[in-house]
Image (cartoon, helix red, strand yellow):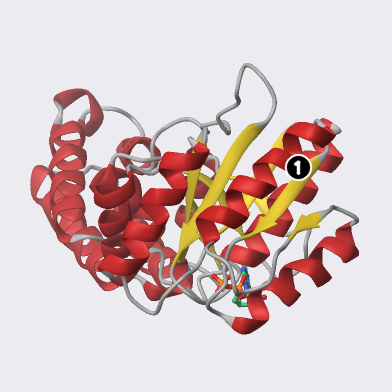
Amino acid sequence: MAFEGLTERLQNAIGKLRKKGKISEADVREVMREIRLALLEADVNFQVVKDFVKTVRTRAIGAEVLESLTPAQQIVKIVNDELTKVMGEEAVELNKSDKIPTIIMMVGLQGAGKTTTLGKLALKLKSEKNARPLMIAGDIYRPAAIDQLQILGKSIDIPVFALGTDISPVEIVRQGLALAAEKKNDYVLIDTAGRLQIDELLMDELAQIKELAQPNEILLTVDAMTGQNAVEVAKGFNEQLDVTGVVLTKLDGDTRGGAALSIRAVTGKPIKFIGQGEKMTDLDVFYPDRMSSRILG
Ligand code: GDP
């Protein structure tokens, strides 16, 4: 289960406070040391932990908190507030174009869940907004990617534009967009190639697709299970492509939570959705306050 270790350690730290009637400044410092360790162990980015602990400590040591009748409860509230803030406070909606189609370009490393998420998002748009999306199969390097998208498309009854693998992705996208214009699709979702690591060739190609398609949304898919690495990947993609949002996948697994807590603070970009399973319906809007409650348990 996601966040298990983090939740347990936070609850332990806070549990000790609850047992005390009156709380001193030293107690706050002690609990903050434990929270700091818990966050670092959960793979939260070092700088994020440092800033977080400092803010919570300063607020918690404030006279009103320690002298209140329920100091432990107030400290839990502060931790909850600040966790929510670190993750961006509010849910951020998908960008939408004034005129059709809204173009969404999906990027990410191989295996992160990009193609799956593309299908999930197309289905969500169809079922919640009555949209008529077109998916474009632009990953010509992983041989099975196009088949995978076509099978997915059939299962959710959403059309896929594909031209095989002997043609450049930019050309596929150009023709796909022309078809979408003709068919008046209101959303176009472009699947792109992933790699095992960020490399220049990949980034060049993605930049060319971006230039041509002028997407309203560049969604980066990152795998929550990869912890600190997920944050590094997000930083790298964002520097090269100026992404507009992040989808954090595999939050149903036993991720320690670091990526969920660090990505917004490190990249400045919102997590817009979370993937919580392999089924096409396992995609949810990311609500920082709900995530914070889930982490606190
Ligand atoms: P891509 O290479 O980035 O396009 O990755 P895929 O979409 O092919 O996904 C890689 C694997 O991750 C597949 O087995 C997916 O079913 C799985 N996957 C994707 N998203 C999630 C998720 O949110 N939870 C779980 N448990 N598995 C996921």
Q: Nearer the viewer, residue 68 or 286?
A: 286
User: Residue at point 59% right, 51% down?
Assistant: 173
Q: Secondary structure at mark 1?
A: helix
Q: Residues within 10 Å of mark 1 (few under 14, many from 20)?
A: some
User: Residue at point 22% right, 23% down?
Assistant: 64
On the image, numbered disc 1 is attached to which residue? 179
Tell me: 259 left or right of 218.
left
Image height of 160 relative to 214, above or below: below
Determine whether the beta carbon of the residue marked 1 sits less than 8 angstroms from the nearest atom of ligand 1. no
User: Residue at point 27% right, 51% down?
Assistant: 240
Q: Nearer the viewer, residue 282 or 73?
A: 282
Image height of 214 relative to 120, above or below: above
Q: Quadrant of ligand 1?
A: bottom right
Location of residue 23 in the rendering, given as x and y in whole percent from the top left corner:
20, 44
Tell me: 284 left or right of 255.
right
Image height of 73 relative to 107, above or below: above
